[in-house]
Image: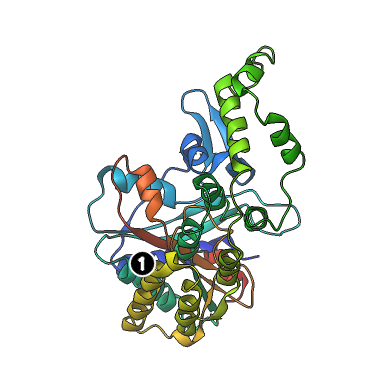
Amino acid sequence: MADKADIKAEAERLFAAFQDAGAAPVETALLQPAEVLLDLYGEDIRARAYVTSDGVLGEQMLRPDFTVPIVQAHMQDGAEPARYTYMGAVFRQQQAGTGRANEYMQVGYEVFDRTNPAEADAEVFALFDRTLSGRGLQASTGDIGILIAAVQGLETSPRRRAALLRHIWRPKRFRALLDRFAGRGPAPEGRAELVDALAGLDLGQIVQGAGPEIGLRSAHEVVARLDALRMDADVPAIPGAQIDAVLALLDIAEPVETAAETLNEVAAQLPSIKNAVTNFQARLDALKTHAVDLSWVTYEGAYGRTSMEYYDGFVFGFAQNGAAPVASGGRYDALTRVLGQGREIPAVGGVIRPAQLLEAGL
């Protein structure tokens, strides 16, 4: 395990390098309002963060990452364009047996710039590439935006598309939903029997006659949910060719320089991804102008799906021999829209974990 003094020294070196690249240093509070993170990610975040309660401030979380508070601060009074860097500890609960630290240092670089998103993606990746050069790391990239575009183009109901989009970052649940919506997998146990029992009935009368309300859902919400289940049962299965195309996207794992051709082949079955693939090619061209050696960079269609759920475009990571990434990042445009109170701006960034660098002998 790396010595804390060595970790801090490495963090300060990286912090200085990012400032030399033009980023303004910023700090964020160690305690963050839990309400914001719960609104973004739902109750699932509780299993990954440390939550405490304050008599004045209410529920608070030990900072699980820097991006959310930095986006909030920028959207309140940040200039455009802007580049920020930060250094500090983050806290995340870990499952037993993983050996991962629940407190570790991060050094990050974030870009808020609406001029040319592909160029900003390339700027961030190239900076990390230069900063980590000579350490024998493998770079992996992906694009959540392509997968989002694929789901948005599926021939199915808005409700089913929304369910798939909500679970993009939960691979097992996402695949189960795909199979079910394609007619290839079973519905939840008892769902068919419930829908059959509701056929032709007045749902409002059923709920009104069911007794007093004792749960958290109102009678109106219960009726709406039952009606949604009944309507969903009549939605046709998603065409098999479209499901196969989505699975083909997720299976891509090849050099980034050849991935555009593969993505264009998939786009023949899923036209909704064509604009996203065009953006991918623009990013590839921008990386070349930054003199990034792409021969050692791979593209993986499923990359980044187990990271924080705000990534919605380009994602990347640097790792050694398949181990956990020592650096990672991506694009999070939608997060600025959610936290911007009516404003939004394209944004991309990433973090380096100095402890992992040192522990790997890098």
**Residue 112 locus on image (x, y percent):** 30, 58
Residue 183 falls in image quadrant: bottom right
**Residue 141 locus on image (x, y percent):** 50, 72
The amino acid marked with disc number 1 is Phe
Query: Residue visible at 55% across and 40% down?
Result: 42
| Vertical order, 190 against 239 (above or below) | above
Q: Is residue 130 left or right of residue 112?
A: right
User: Front-most of 160 and 102?
Assistant: 160
Q: Is residue 109 in view from this perspective?
A: no
User: Front-most of 131 and 165?
Assistant: 165
User: Front-most of 203 and 32?
Assistant: 203
**Residue 281 locus on image (x, y percent):** 38, 77
**Residue 5 locus on image (x, y percent):** 54, 62
- For disc 1, the marked residue is 18
| Vertical order, 90 against 244 (above or below) | above
Q: Is residue 312 left or right of residue 116?
A: right
Q: Quadrant of the N terminus?
A: bottom right
Number of marks in picture: 1
